[in-house]
Amino acid sequence: MAIGRESLEKVFKISNPKWRTAITKVEPNRIITRGYSQEDLIGSVSFPEMVYLLIKGEMPSKKESKMLNSVLVSFCDHGITPPSTQAARMIASAGSPAHACIAGGLLAFGKNHAGAIERSMMAFQESIRRSDSENDLFNTAQRFVDYYLKKGAKVPGFGHRYHTEDPRAVKLMEIAQKNDFVGRHTLLALKVQDILLEKKGIKMNIDGANASILSDMGFDWRTGTGIFMIGRLPGLISHVYEEKVLESDFRKFIDIEDVYYDGITEKVSHNKDLKKSGD
Amino acid sequence: MAIGRESLEKVFKISNPKWRTAITKVEPNRIITRGYSQEDLIGSVSFPEMVYLLIKGEMPSKKESKMLNSVLVSFCDHGITPPSTQAARMIASAGSPAHACIAGGLLAFGKNHAGAIERSMMAFQESIRRSDSENDLFNTAQRFVDYYLKKGAKVPGFGHRYHTEDPRAVKLMEIAQKNDFVGRHTLLALKVQDILLEKKGIKMNIDGANASILSDMGFDWRTGTGIFMIGRLPGLISHVYEEKVLESDFRKFIDIEDVYYDGITEKVSHNKDLKKSGD
Amino acid sequence: MAIGRESLEKVFKISNPKWRTAITKVEPNRIITRGYSQEDLIGSVSFPEMVYLLIKGEMPSKKESKMLNSVLVSFCDHGITPPSTQAARMIASAGSPAHACIAGGLLAFGKNHAGAIERSMMAFQESIRRSDSENDLFNTAQRFVDYYLKKGAKVPGFGHRYHTEDPRAVKLMEIAQKNDFVGRHTLLALKVQDILLEKKGIKMNIDGANASILSDMGFDWRTGTGIFMIGRLPGLISHVYEEKVLESDFRKFIDIEDVYYDGITEKVSHNKDLKKSGD
Amino acid sequence: MAIGRESLEKVFKISNPKWRTAITKVEPNRIITRGYSQEDLIGSVSFPEMVYLLIKGEMPSKKESKMLNSVLVSFCDHGITPPSTQAARMIASAGSPAHACIAGGLLAFGKNHAGAIERSMMAFQESIRRSDSENDLFNTAQRFVDYYLKKGAKVPGFGHRYHTEDPRAVKLMEIAQKNDFVGRHTLLALKVQDILLEKKGIKMNIDGANASILSDMGFDWRTGTGIFMIGRLPGLISHVYEEKVLESDFRKFIDIEDVYYDGITEKVSHNKDLKKSGD
């Protein structure tokens, strides 16, 4: 009689902690993801549909799938200006392998760089959750703006370092409107823009546009940075490739002359004088 | 008269090293990527087309775009089994922010994990470059197999730890054949499979299938790991989300009892006996 | 006449943003760190003194230098049990270069792993700042404990997953007492331990011991994780070396059988049936 | 009767793969590292001795311990000039937590940045292994130099971007000579310097000095980058702290004007014209 591991563990109380997952089940010659066998998915679904399925656990509608495709495309690249791209290229220039350069670039997706998308999503989702009715949306937008302006803080999702009008946000809003994809979060974002434009001359940026669209699709705000990363990864890869293949090694990104030392002036000229400050 | 920076630098020989890039040009309210304005790209191209454009510098054909979509989908997830997924979840369990978990996962895309795709691509591309004619393909495949078997090495792109027949590779080859997308690299891969199947009972895996297809599309082998990363990122994100949101903190992944210590036995019981080996 | 860059910039208002730093000034053949020339530091100061000088900006006293040495030694290694060590070895097993393995290990220094030292330091420093007098220390300790117990939270710096009495904490407290190094933060930590021991049978751990000692030295709590990292790095390096040199590649850390899939059961058996949930 | 897990596994052939390690044995209330209990090590050994013990598996002599201390101190910091420091500060500026900034900095320890120490160590160790006698050292040095000069390559461990005479290397050699710590590897390095100085006016740098000293201590060249990291970590930590605490968020490290775009000129002005190159 064969005694199974499971029954043995039950009898003898050997604990065998297992990992729990609801994403993919791997069996010999068979891989099931979110309930679909991968051989059925490959060739049948688009990559944005796969993104939606993996993260949300279900298939998008055709309309959602097209909209998510535009979102991912819009994140593609912003040249050498973002800190993530600069960090990735610098690490490439130092001679690390491509996967380490990409990882280093993604480490710069901190709260001041990629953080705006999650902050926008959280703020939109929170605001909509607390607004009781459709009619209330203008007041919600007003409270949204006031909250940040009173603190003297930037409104997440609005304004851009380089652009007075972010062309990507404009296009995304156009597409959303043309495809009848303007839900309550996007409507809120548009009303916030109206108020900010009048008060401060500030317009929606790519983070605000995508945050409102992703919120209308029901994405948890904690997945926002991840979705940004998917969109940006191809750009990062091409920057790392460009740096590794086309540029010379170890470029002097910052010259000694570009550094301003404001530390203490020299204390010590001879070894014997080296003093401990605490003694 | 305003004197421009450029002319000043020329006159006074102040060096102002610039970064060179051919990917994206950023101007106020205008972003040009590989010659296309981003507002034209958003809503017009699919995400796989954007991947192709960014990495190869030009637009794919419709056929290439569909095939690349299947490639990206096929990389999506392999449950908790890959070291990248385990590393990402472990870092998530330790309480790091999502972007650091993802970066840590990608650091595991080393030569033993994600390396096979680049090794396959390099080997296919190298072999095809050296084979003089179409007729020669069978001999090329034979030399390909012999090279690894003589060294007693694994053939990159063939065989799998869990699957005797990788269902993703089977499906990708089907799609390539149905869409008339079997170029010389894919033909070589199929012939290598024939030989290996007869000699060793080993079949093509997902890396071999995708390496041959990407090579037929003209992707430099050094971009292979990057393309794998794009496909895998949505899966990694959903694993990190699952770990952070659904699991308890700091799970004891490895118990003391699962560790076998084979170091030296204890030397010291009292502090005064602490001996320096070198004295 | 040579016109300097500086005067040119002044005249023509070319902005040349400089990096500001107070740590090290690099000149040709001359490197000044925190006011000391490096050639004077090398051979004159101990490594812990260098750590103190770099982070705090001044030299420690002899007593502080000895105490910091013990702190750094105490962080050295805890076998394969910490997530940082497991992540580093897993990445090593996947074939990444050593520096990427180490970086991946450090990414696991998240709030649930290395976070306790900074939380302890912050809590001790905050408590001491708000306690008006030496006499008040017992009440401060009481409030400290109550704050966490009322929330049902773990007290940072006390209790350990594996040890009922953390031998490193015991030794560190002994050394602090023997060397007359018990300041207000350490006194507070000892009083907190007294209360917790009586109420819950819980003792100080290595994080609590080091947090109190480092606080008595005047280290800002935001440097705590960094100091832990310095102490732990040699251990991580030896783990990565052990994995890369002594173990086989790509070890199956987690077997398929160790994974419990609790996702949805299979929905789809034939490609044509692949349904979009949202349609 | 209690049946142990071990005997159960034997009987029923349940495989329980264990991790093997020779570094640290963790038992409840007892931690043994390389054969020494940690409570005996804390307070008895210096941090450099701990580094030696962890990496080499045995205690250093007093002389070795002092020398290793100087090596670690000499790596301390080189201002903002290295790519690792720039990457760490850039990631800090993007708002990532300190441990992610440090990890990102270490990712820049690639072959062009930190690689020189391992290349030097490997080259010295290889050369000494192949030189048959003490007398042969001058010829070995000659072959060493010729090997690189013939290839037109930089000699690893010699020459510096900023310094014509690296003050750290000079001091380390002084200390080695004063303490009678000049073994065969260091002697080789000095002879290589003599030849290079005469031929090319190039002197030993910090990597060459430390590579020869660490080789004389018997450190495997594959641990070189790790030892460099230990020495450099305190500097990186103080840079990250400086950036996070003293500087403003998201500094524009690189301005649009500092980027030179040499990609294709714009192809598309209207959406309908968006052409696929491959069609």
Image (cartoon, coloured by chain):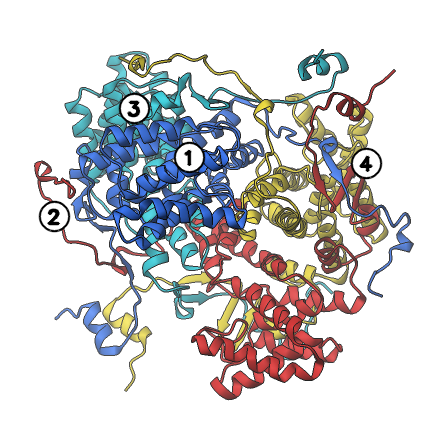
Chain colours: A blue, B cyan, C red, D yellow
Q: Which residue is mark 3?
A: B45
How far is mark 4 from mark 1, CA to CA? 51 Å
User: Disc 1, disc 2: CB below 8 Å?
Assistant: no
Mark 2 or 3: in front is 3
Residue B153 appearing in the image: no
Residue type (three-letter) at the residue carrying disc 1 = Met
Residue topped by disc 2: C267
Q: Callout 1: few (<14), some (14-19), or many (20+) C-alpha neighbours within 10 Å?
A: many
- The residue wearing badge 1 is A204
Residue under mark 2: which chain is it in? Answer: C
Mark 4 vs mark 2, CA separation in Å: 70 Å
Residue that label 4 marks = C29
Front-most of A219 and A269? A219
Q: Are marks 4 and 3 in contact (CB under 8 Å)?
A: no
> Which amino acid type is marked by label 4?
Asn
Q: Nearer the viewer, residue B264 or B77?
A: B77
Picture coordinates of residue C14, whole percent (x, y): 70, 23
